[in-house]
Image (cartoon, helix red, strand yellow):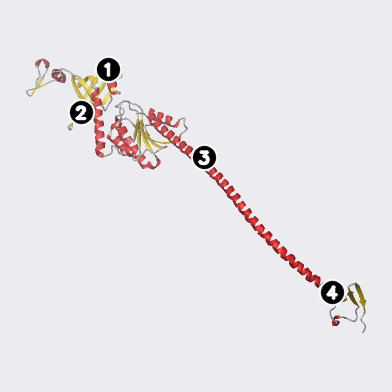
């Protein structure tokens, strides 16, 4: 290292080697760096920390870079006058403010301060680099999911129709969660849904592990739910980069239940959106899908009931017509049967009457014959022939042996009776 005499006004020799004051050394370093890096230059690095001094308004950063095993750190700052312009430019291009954890490409001036040491003064920023870095990460996530065979896994899951048992992954303090729940539960149609919240961080360094844990819990209870809904309210592209991370997208893709995403993107889709069974732009749009499903199901049920009702009415009318035809047929058959019975009855009656007449005629002849026989055997007729009837004690006697000598006799003749006594 060469030191110029004008830069070393005071020095002390020790063992034939010069010893310099720290101030002289730092002054020389400052001038050397100024000579070596006279112009601004572009530097790529990651922001480790970042804070704005509340008194001065200057922004102080710590930058880092790891490349091929090497690791570097350096302090940087943005003057108050430049900070507002740089922030506005970055927000306009990326949709968010600068913050720790971002990869940035900045225009810097290398400076060495005698009192505070080496630092970079940031004069400008290239937002396209940060956006491009996110795009590269996103592409790597998509390629890895495709290589693993998980990219289309969740798309094959059938979304139940309708659905009312929902496992919801969201930050309970997020506005998107409140909007989703209110839109779904306070719907004007009176539909009710079973919502189970699995709270998770959706931003920050701990968000990946938090979202993975939520999906693991749902897997253990998957029999209780029809599907999973992952929501987050609107935000910048960088705010939503967590949903481009492989670990989160993989949890969505491999979920055994269909996953619906409502991650308030304004410009494009996250990787989680791409691998989910269905994706929507906002949490409210996701709730609208569920309500539409319920309306369609209700409409289908009403159509089914109407169809059943119409078929029942048609069936009843058809049965009524069949019954009328049957009644008419029964009436016709009954009348015909009655006529047949009447004919048979008349024929039978005629036969009976003829038989009765024949029998009556036969009986009349027999009666006449019997009357003739009876008349011929009549006591009166016998008496008319000169015969007499002998009665004793009111009984007709046919022989002498039947007559008792102790009782009088009555002799009945044609023209009267004669009483007689028996003499011994």
Instruction: Compare residues 30 and 157 and report the one nearer the observer.
Output: 157
Q: Are marks 4 and 2 in contact (CB under 8 Å)?
A: no
Which residue does the image show at 58% across and 50% down from the upper left?
Answer: 333
Q: Say above or below: 293 vs 422.
A: above
- Residue 206 appears in the picture as rendered: no
Which residue does the image show at 91% across and 72% down from the upper left?
Answer: 416
x and y percent of residue 395 in the render?
A: 85, 75
Q: CA distance from mark 4 to mark 3?
A: 95 Å
Task: Tell me which label, 4 or 1, sits earlier in the chain.
Answer: 1
Could you classify mark 2 by the number of other residues whose Cα lies within 10 Å: few (under 14), some (14-19), or many (20 or more)? some
Residue annotated with mark 1: 85
Which residue does the image show at 85% across and 71% down from the upper left?
Answer: 380
Residue annotated with mark 3: 313
Residue annotated with mark 2: 65
- Element under disc 3: helix
- Residue 293 appears in the picture as rendered: yes
Residue 307 image label:
none
Quarter holding residue 18 = top left
Q: Which quarter of the rendering shows the N terminus?
A: top left
Residue 382 image label:
4
Q: Are marks 4 and 3 in contact (CB under 8 Å)?
A: no
Q: Residue furthest front?
A: 385
x and y percent of residue 313 in the render?
A: 52, 40
Number of the front mark, 4 or 3: 4
Asked if residue 51 lies left or right of residue 424, the reply is left
């Amino acid at each position: 290292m060469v030191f110029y005499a004008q830069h070393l006004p005071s020095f002390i020799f020790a063992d034939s080697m010069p010893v310099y004051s720290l101030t002289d050394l730092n002054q020389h370093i400052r001038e050397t760096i100024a000579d070596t890096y006279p112009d601004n230059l572009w530097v790529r690095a990651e922001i480790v920390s970042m804070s704005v001094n509340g008194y001065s308004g200057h922004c102080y950063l710590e930058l880092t870079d790891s490349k091929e095993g090497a690791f570097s750190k350096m302090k940087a700052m943005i003057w108050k006058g430049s900070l507002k312009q740089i922030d506005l430019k970055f927000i306009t291009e990326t949709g968010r403010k600068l913050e720790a954890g971002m990869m940035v490409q900045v225009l810097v001036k290398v400076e060495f301060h005698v009192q505070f040491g080496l630092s970079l003064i940031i004069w400008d920023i290239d937002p396209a680099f940060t956006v491009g870095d996110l795009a590269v990460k996103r592409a790597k996530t998509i390629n890895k999911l495709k290589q693993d065979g998980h990219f289309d896994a969740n798309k094959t899951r059938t979304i139940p129709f309708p659905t009312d048992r929902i496992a919801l992954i969201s930050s309970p303090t997020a506005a998107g969660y409140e909007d989703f729940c209110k839109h779904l539960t306070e719907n004007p149609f009176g539909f009710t849904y079973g919502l189970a919240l699995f709270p998770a961080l959706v931003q920050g360094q701990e968000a990946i592990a938090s979202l993975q844990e939520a999906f693991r819990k749902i897997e253990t209870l998957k029999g209780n739910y029809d599907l999973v809904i992952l929501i987050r309210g609107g935000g910048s592209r960088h705010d939503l980069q967590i949903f481009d991370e492989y670990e989160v997208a993989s949890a969505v893709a491999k979920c055994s239940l269909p996953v619906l995403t409502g991650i308030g993107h304004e410009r494009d889709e996250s990787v989680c959106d791409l691998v989910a069974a269905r994706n929507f732009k906002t949490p409210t749009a996701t709730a609208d899908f569920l309500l539409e499903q319920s309306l369609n199901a209700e409409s289908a049920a009403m159509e089914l009931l109407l169809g059943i009702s119409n078929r029942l009415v048609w069936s009843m009318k058809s049965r009524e017509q069949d019954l009328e035809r049957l009644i008419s047929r029964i009436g016709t058959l009954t009348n015909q049967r009655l006529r047949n019975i009447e004919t048979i009855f008349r024929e039978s009656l005629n036969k009976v009457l003829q038989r009765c007449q024949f029998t009556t005629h036969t009986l009349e002849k027999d009666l006449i014959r019997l009357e003739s026989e009876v008349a011929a055997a009549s006591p009166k007729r016998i008496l008319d022939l000169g015969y007499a009837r002998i009665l004793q004690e009111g009984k007709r006697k046919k022989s002498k042996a039947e007559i008792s000598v102790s009782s009088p006799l009555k002799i009945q003749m044609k023209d009267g009776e004669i009483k007689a006594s028996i003499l011994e």
